[in-house]
Amino acid sequence: MSPTVAFVRSQSEPQLPPPLFSQGALAWAKENLFSSITSTLITVLCVAAFLWTIPELIAWATIKAIWVAPDGALCRQHQDGACWAFIGQKLGYLSFGSYPESEHWRVDVVEVLGAVLIVWLLWPRVPAKRQAALGFFVIYPILSFILLVGAPALGLPRVDTLLWGGVFVSLITAVVGIVVSLPLGVLLALGRRSQLPVVRLASVIFIEFVRGVPFITVLFMANNMLPLFLPSGWEPDRFSRPLVGIALFSAAYMAEEVRGGLQTLAKGQYEGAMALGLDYGRMMRLVVLPQALALVIPGIVNNFIGLFKDTTLVAIVGINDFLATMDNAFKDPVWAGPSLLATGYVFAAAFYFVFCYAMSAYSAGVERRLSVGRRR
Amino acid sequence: MQRSLVNDPKVRGLFYQTLLVVILVALIAFAWRNAVVNMTARGIPLGFEFWNQTSGFDINLSLINYSALSTYGDAFWVGLLNTLLVAAISIVLATPLGFVVGIARLSPNWILSRVALVYVEIMRNTPLLLQLLFWYNAVLKALPGPRQSLSVSGLVFLNNRGLYLPKPVFAEGAWVVAAALLIGVIAAYLFSRWAARRQANTGQQAPVFSVGAALVILPPLAMYFIAGMPISFNYATLSGFNLRGGLQLFPEFAALVFGLVTYTAAFIAEIVRAGVLAVSHGQTEAASALGLKRGWTMRLIVVPQAMRLIIPPLTSQYLNIVKNSSLAVFIGYPDLVLIFAGTVLNQTHAAVQVMAITMAVYLVISLAIAGLLNFYNDRMSLKER
């Protein structure tokens, strides 16, 4: 056997680089942007549309915008840009309404305390959820009520609800909604699943009635009919009437959410609890509800997003929520001008978007965490 | 004996239920009595006599004959029809848009799926009311006046008084064309059923689409010319300071429909996406193994199976459209809530009666749609052996 054969290599060829389109950014682009003729066409159209609109939008919001101005004159001259100066000027009104300036700290305290409690409740790693729940659902509402309404005995002058407005009213409406509707919703859900026909019927009628009508009509009813249903002299405050409406309204939706959790829970859990000799209250409190509520946290948060968006409707019964204060601010003759509307609505949209997006991201995160055990 | 009675679940249940009934009855009686006392004290009518009284206000958009001399009852019907009109149009438009966006969310094209995602997130995370106010105040009201209308080749005009479309004018003999259209549609439907049956029996395919299109389009077209062109279009034209003629859609109506459609389409898109994703992957793989293209796989394999999951939440979105159309109040579209729970209530002060009627109407619509859904679910649910 000869040591070398002419046609067999003794050394390997140098390795060639992989084909251009098989890895890295180009491969990604081929796969995701130009995989077919249609896809290429869509990509080109989208990019063209972006080039056409996005630079203009960015210019509207930045270089063409008026950032600082004493009044609306400058904004009326430059109508092709946003009028951020208007937002800056009105920020106090948009946040607090006509709440007296010297008392703004009270609103701030309520807001910070609420934020702390909510983070405590919702952040899984922080311990002592029971105390957090007690704080948020019992102590916090009482404290906020005293702080916001005022207690002359404690040296806090009363602030009439007529003066309330802005972001804080939106937040309070939403928080009252959740604080009242969650316990009420749990009760209604239990009622709907109850063995007792009368309890079940009453719950079903309430839930289906409320879910079948628009929120505006519930607000109208709370505003116009609540005073009629109470003896004269009991007239509820104009601010608390829509709060009753919002609480009842969201309780019905919350109940359906909780019912979903109760239904997914395995029957063995109920039977196990009964076999241990727990009575109904203990069975629900110790075995069923902790599991069922943990299951529906994403649903509850999504419900809360809807509730938060719905708080904008309270303007119809004369409550100055954030959006209503924005609409009022447009009418200020010092500022009034055509570029205000887009500026104001974009700002308001950004505000709602940040809140709602954060909540939906949280709920998606919980959903992922919950499904870990069920994933294969 | 005493103890065992207390612990007997039946006795306890009876006790709790009686307690609940007593509390509820007491509450209702309390509210009822107060309402009667308060209403008599304030001179508010207790009955429904107002229904036949003259309303005295005008409504700028009405599908039936209505004037300031009509009754409150007529005003109610005008409002109800306007609500149903806006809801029906919104449903018809939101469904295809939602499906398109939902499918786009799943597109293999990265940019398209991102665009759809951004659309969905923005729409779902901002209040509908804000969007409506934006479209109405910042977009439609900010349009130029009639003299500087935006126009598409003189056929469609858009200005701050609304959207002007060509208005069809039906002359004598137009019914022949309509009849031909109706017959064409029925014929096309029968043909497609016959073709489906033949394909199931013999495997032979028929050109359903082209024959169907021909059946729908050709007979009305032929009748149109035979009958001497009885349908013409009336275009809006500028006369003086305003546009005259054409079909004018008020800005309130346009903003409400546009807002409802774009908002609800985002929710429908998510429903469609979830439904499509829930169809087992093996189905798509089997379809591509059979050599079906992506579009065909979607149309023939995935969407029909996804529909079972899509329909129930889709129906609840339709219900939401009906309920959300009540936001018309904020932009002044004369719907049921604005006319009846607004103007009529303020004029008659009959708050309890008016709110009861308004809520009953929405309840009936909700229950009717829910009933239809249950009927559909029973028919469509998987028939398991």
Image: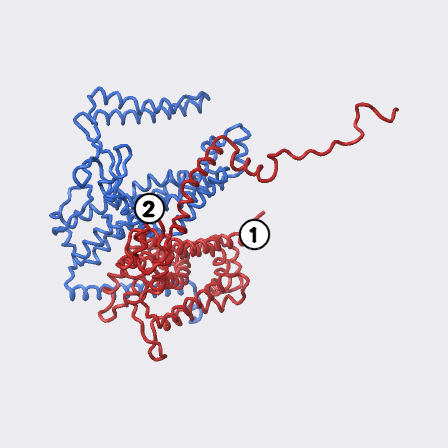
Q: Nearer the viewer, residue A34 or B232?
A: A34
Q: Position of residue B170 (x, y in %)?
A: 19, 29
Please give the name of the residue rendered at 24% of the width and 65% of the height, measured from the top-left corner.
A227
Q: Which chain is blue?
A: B
Q: Position of residue B346 (x, y in %)?
A: 19, 57
Tell me: residue A20, above or below residue A115: above
Give the Cα separation between the discs numbered 2 and 1. 38 Å
The reply to whether residue B218 is in sight is yes
Q: Position of residue A217 (x, y in %)?
A: 28, 55
Q: Nearer the viewer, residue B153 or A253?
A: B153
Q: Nearer the viewer, residue A336 or B354?
A: A336
Quadrant in the picture for residue A224: bottom left
Please give the name of the residue rendered at 46% of the width and 69% of the height, measured from the top-left corner.
A134
Provide the secondary structure element on which disc 2 rests: helix
Q: Which chain is red?
A: A
The reply to whether residue A197 is in sight is no
In the picture of the structure, the residue carrying the numbered disc 2 is B259
Please give the name of the residue rendered at 57% of the width and 48% of the height, measured from the top-left corner.
A375
Q: Nearer the viewer, residue A237 or B313?
A: A237
- Identify the amino acid type marked 2: Gly
Tell me: residue B304, above or below residue B342: above
In the picture of the structure, the residue carrying the numbered disc 1 is A372
